[in-house]
Image (tube, rainbow, N blue to C red):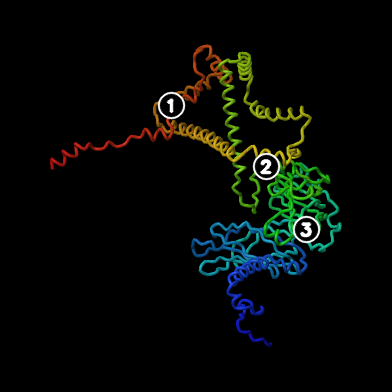
Amino acid sequence: MWSLPIPDGLAMDPMSPTALAVPTELMDRIGSGLTILRDHGKKLQKYLWKNRKFEVLKKTWKSMVTIVLVEARDLPDVPANNSNGLYCKFRLGNESHKSKQVHKSKPVWRERFNLHLYDDNSLEIKVWHKTKQKNFMGRCVIDLSQLERERTHDLWQELECGYGSVHLLVTLCGTERSPAIQNVLTTNGVHHPAPAEDKYLWYRLDDTWSEVGQLSVTVHGARGLTALNLSGNVDAYCILELDNSRVQTHVVHGTCEPNWNKNFVFAVNDITSTLDLTVYDESIIQSMKGETLGKISIPLLRINNNEKKWYALKDKSQKSSAKGNCPRILLEMSLVWNPVKASLRLLTPKETKYVQKPTKFDIPLIYSNLKFIKSIFNYIQVGNDHLKRLFEWENQEKSAIALGAWLIFWYFFRMWMTPLLLVLPFAHNWIVQRNNNAPAPIYQYDDDTTDEDVESHKDDKTIKTRLYGLQDLTFTIKNAIDYIVSFLERINNLLNFSVPYLSYLVILVLIGASIAFYVIPVNYIFMAFGIYKFSRKFLNPSRVPNNDLLDFLSRVPDNEMLKQWRELKVPEPNVYRTETIKGR
């Protein structure tokens, strides 16, 4: 080894001893800039090292291993402390990952990790608890060669050299990488196997109750994808998710029209679930930004078996089309399920999705929800006004028909008819749809609005108009909420004898009503109630329309009125104090 002497006026960068010597003045001027660039370079190097992108590019991995660390249970006791020090470390070959630290009293992580399978099939998991010192809680080893590929495995793995167990979801997918330039049709997955229908016949109830069916999906390919990088190339792959099951295709490089031709089989635990498909670009920059080429959600109950169909890809919000030349994906699906087990499964808690994106503060969504609540209050108010008009005989024909219908209904009503009454709204909507020649569901309607219409709509609704509209919505909902809260407080104060006279009066009325229901058939009581409501206008033509129950509750104070009624202690008069002092 030999080195040249550094000339006068030149300096050597101490962080890069192999770099060329530069003038001292130049180092002084740009020293801070080099430090900033060096820090960013270290961050990028750390990210690349953590994700092993370079190693993946150089070597050919056999499969992508996706691990979801859910939770742990029955772990050994450690010294009590308030720190979040429980974490797990994964190692597969030369690649390792570390989970976040959680509190031992609630060991729930719900994190996802991606590792690459090369030659070593042993996945090692260690559980540590870090306080002032690291405490080893246990370890376990999973032989990935024993797990079926292209399927998510729900595992409770017992810890060796310790106590407790760890809950994991492990998926092996992706298989080997496709050639970097080729985009040829492969034979893997071209055949679309139909699920075994005999296994899920309605009378076959001997299998596990958690699995109600089976879904087979063939992802043929996509068209019209747009490149998100400067090179104009797309390295696309597709991820499919059904509840907590998650698989992905291999990567097809350098084309906007990838062909995957992969088949996947999912176990269906809930027939009302949704199949989510997302197309990603494998480039490092897009992986860091979390960008997608398109996504789509398909409810299982809307799948037509063995139908090869193009689905339009949407953006991240799934409200408009994704970028590109009519981006779409070609799918073929088959679904078989047991209707008896699926119906019983609807009465159990829905499966929780372990890994979810945090919810964001969505102002347009809040605005639409406020409008929806306001419309409900308006409907209630309009319905109440219609009832008042019927009782006041403003339209004599409608009021007469309503009174006749009320009397006939309660004369023939029996308790077994109650479920049939709940069927009436369904029957009404079904008949309307049949008369309208069975319109297509909402998800099949095309959006005919153009960009010009959207722009003109934005121009019409200025910021000032939106603010006034939001203010009006806020006041309407605030008044309605205040009324509901006051109504509930009055009922509570009636029950706790805030005004004893009113409480005792209600008790006497309820006892009298129970005696009446015992003696008189309920049909006749409701018929008499209808006659009373409709005949009040004739008995007292000058009466003011009212509601008896609400008028009675208006006499009961709410909490604000009780605060105003609260008596304060009477202070001693100043004259009395003066006389007391003089007497002393």
Q: Position of residue 362 (x, y in %)?
A: 61, 46
Helix, strand or loop at mark 1: loop
Q: Position of residue 471 (x, y in %)?
A: 54, 37
Q: CA distance from mark 1 to mark 2?
A: 45 Å
Q: Position of residue 369 (x, y in %)?
A: 60, 39
Helix, strand or loop at mark 3: loop
Q: Position of residue 177 (x, y in %)?
A: 79, 63
- Nearest to viewer (mark 3 / mark 1): 3
Q: Amino acid at mark 2?
A: Leu
Q: Nearer the viewer, residue 551 or 191?
A: 551
Q: Which residue is mark 2?
A: 346
Asked where in the image residue 253 lies, by quadrant, the reply is bottom right
The answer to which of marks 1 and 2 sits earlier in the sequence is 2
Q: Amino acid at mark 3?
A: Gly
The answer to which of marks 2 and 3 sits earlier in the sequence is 3
Badge 3 crowding class, 10 Å Cα cut-off, few under 14, some 14 to 19, many 20 or more, is: few
Q: Amino acid at mark 1?
A: Arg
Q: Which residue is mark 1?
A: 555
Q: Is 181 situated left or right of 21 in this image?
A: right
Q: CA distance from mark 3 to mark 1?
A: 74 Å
Q: Nearer the viewer, residue 423 or 465?
A: 465
Q: Nearer the viewer, residue 151 or 97?
A: 97
The answer to which of marks 3 and 1 sits earlier in the sequence is 3
Q: Residue at x 61, y 75 (%)?
A: 26
Q: Which residue is mark 3?
A: 232
Q: Is 102 situated left or right of 225 in this image?
A: left
Taking 366 as reference, is 426 above or below it?
above
